Image (spheres, grey):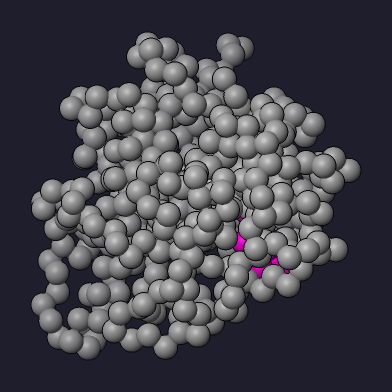
Amino acid sequence: MAPRPRVFITGLGSVTALGLGVDALWGAARDGRTGVRELALPRIANQLVKRAAHLPDFDAPSHLPPEVLRSTDRFAQMAIIAAREALTDADWNLAEKLGPRAAVLVGSSIGGATTSDIEHFKFYQSRERTDPMTIPKVMPNAAASQLSMAFGARGMSLAVSSACSSASQAIGLGLMLLRQGMADRALVGGSECLLTPATFRAWETLRVMTLGECRPFSTGRDGMALGEGAAMLLLETEEAALARGVRPRAELAGFGTTSDAGDIVRPDAAGAAGAMKAALADAGLGAHDVDYVNAHGTGTILNDRSESEALRRVFGGRLDTLAVSSTKPVHGHTLGAAGALELVITVRALQDGIVPPTINWLGADRDCIPDPVPNAARAIAICAAMSNSFAFGGINASLIVRKV
């Protein structure tokens, strides 16, 4: 059997609560600076939770032409800007179309939530004219289709919606596509903008959001902080990258995904452990080869306990010294985009040899990992790293990157 082609990550891009660009995201994650801030919701705002990781001064008209603005929701706009940065980072000439051998796969748990909220308010309350572009804006495949059009990618265009594992599964499917020879390169990632009054209130009623600080794996943790944002990565086969003479940032070496087939909201450690083991096997690595894990780490009681148990099942006694951290207190839980944001951070950690901290940590919890790199970054040599995403619906996804 012929060896599988290697797949490289050649470009990174992001739009987050920390601002435009990967440098802003990575700098904040490394230095432990949060993008969680006061959130002023429009129209009807009766929330108890008043903070989220949002980008209040996101100025789409400064970055996109009027014809694109007229047909896009906030989540697609952020995806386009992040993708443009990823292509630029990969030294791709933006005047050149990506062509028929390029795919686009974008994860989002909902799609155009901002437009949906505005248009529903018009219909039920204000009686204003409905935007005729409402459907093209809200459909979950809008970001993937807009990216295909913006950059001339005429291969597979796919929207992936699997709650908080959406972006990680989109990236993993992109890896599989390139390995199968169905494309030479793929724009992959996720985008999510769900900070609307009704959606925010719906999350609040689940009782998984904190009124204070998000504290993954810490004693005193009581919930997550929602966020918005997008992150995109350019994947290329080794052959395609070498032909362009581009220097890769990392190798995307492994992908594993499982379904708990259990409770719709309660996580299962066995399913999460299965995804991590599958990713390791796919990468041809053992648990001892992983130097850093970017955890799903939401800061909720059940998720952190379950993920800690899953990590113990995979890494055993080595977990006591393994570098594991969660960056969600920095960029918020961006739901369908989370896996992409966190993989971008993981790649930068791999390149720079710095593990970003888990901020807001108060002390060890007996049900959680003992040392989540609390409050301050740690410099270590990283040859291989794992990024985890675990979602409502029992959908688990793990990605592994390796230094090149």
Displayed quadrant of residue 14: top left
Residue 10 located left or right of residue 153: right
Q: Residue furthest right?
A: 317
Front residue of 50/5: it is 50
Q: Position of residue 19 (x, y in %)?
A: 37, 52
Which residue is located at x 16 percent, y 62 percent? 133
Residue 71 located left or right of residue 367: left
Which residue is located at x 75 percent, y 29 percent? 289
Displayed quadrant of residue 117: bottom left
148 is higher (above) or lower (below) than 65: above
Which residue is located at x 62 percent, y 45 percent? 356
Whether residue 111 is visible, yes or no, is yes
Q: Position of residue 143 (x, y in %)?
A: 30, 50
Magenta stretch prevailing secondary structure: loop
Whether residue 316 is visible, yes or no, is no
Front residue of 345/153: it is 345
| Residue 64 is covered by the magenta coloring | no
Q: Position of residue 320 (x, y in %)?
A: 84, 46
Q: Quadrant of the N terminus?
A: top right
Residue 314 located left or right of residue 167: right
Q: Position of residue 29 (x, y in %)?
A: 54, 49
Which residue is located at x 60 percent, y 70 percent? 213
345 is higher (above) or lower (below) than 335: above
Residue range of the region highlighted in magenta in the rendering: 295-304
